[in-house]
Amino acid sequence: MNKYLLILISLLSFSISQAAQVDLKKSNFEWKATKKLGSFHYGNIFLKSAKAELKDNNIVAGEFVMDMKTFTVTDLTGKKQTDFLGHVKSGDFFEVEKFQEAKLVIEKQTGDTVTGKLTIKDKTEPVTVKFTKADKTYTGTLTFDRTKFGIVYNSGNFFKDLAAEKVINNDVEVKFTVVLN
């Protein structure tokens, strides 16, 4: 009887999910926003906290909390950088004083794709993200439509009379590298 109980416990332990530590320092999230006529800006945003659960070497759940106060722009310097960050953190875009966090919740992994929910400015939308994995490092690009989160500044969908050089594309790319310990 003890032998069967031991086998049952062994089998169950392989199917239970395990918590995985996310290395906040080695993980990286780089955003890029573009204009209709091709100019762009990019920078980083840093994790405030993160956790992931693995089962059979797949991510079955996870939560990545971005600290919106750490939002940076790395393609500008000096006054242009300061002005840009002030504008992006204002009510025209992310309204950082009121909404200091953004969150990505992973609900499941199927092959090389995870699905979950992205929350920005207290609005939540479903997301699907393809990734590649090398050992304990996951890389990929999350693309989201900023207007679904109430960020409509200079969107051609909302402001039809804007000059083409003023139109900011709705899609924002976030390239990520997530490293598990």
Image (cartoon, rainbow, N blue to C red):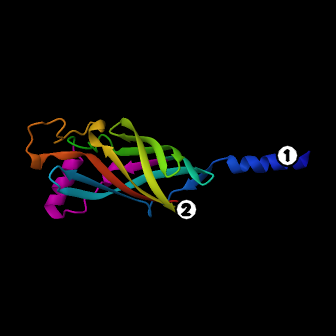
Nearest the eye: 83 or 13: 13
Image quarter in which the N terminus is found:
top right
Sequence order check: which comes first, mark 1 or mark 2?
1
Q: Name the residue: 78% across, 47% down.
A: 9
Nearest the eye: 152 or 84: 152
One can see residue 61 in this view = no
**Picture quadrant of residue 39:** bottom left
Q: Mark 2 = which residue?
A: 181
> Which amino acid type corresponds to the residue marked 2 in the rendered image?
Asn
Mark 1 surroundings within 10 Å by alpha-carbon count, few (fewer than 14), some (14 through 19), many (20 or more) = few
Callout 1 secondary element: helix
Q: Name the residue: 80% across, 46% down.
A: 8
Q: Position of residue 50 (x, y in %)?
A: 48, 51
- Specify whether residue 72 is painted magenta: yes
- Total numbered labels placed on residues in the image: 2
Q: Position of residue 113 (x, y in %)?
A: 48, 49
Q: Position of residue 88 (x, y in %)?
A: 22, 48
Q: Mark 1 = which residue?
A: 5
Q: Position of residue 116 (x, y in %)?
A: 46, 42
Q: Is residue 85 left or right of residue 62?
A: left
Q: CA distance from mark 1 to mark 2?
A: 32 Å
Image quarter in which the C terminus is found:
bottom right
Callout 2 secondary element: loop
Mark 2 surroundings within 10 Å by alpha-carbon count, few (fewer than 14), some (14 through 19), many (20 or more) = few
Q: Name the residue: 7% across, 44% down.
A: 163
Q: Name the residue: 63% across, 48% down.
A: 17
> Which amino acid type corresponds to the residue marked 1 in the rendered image?
Leu
Magenta range: 63-90
One can see residue 77 in this view = yes
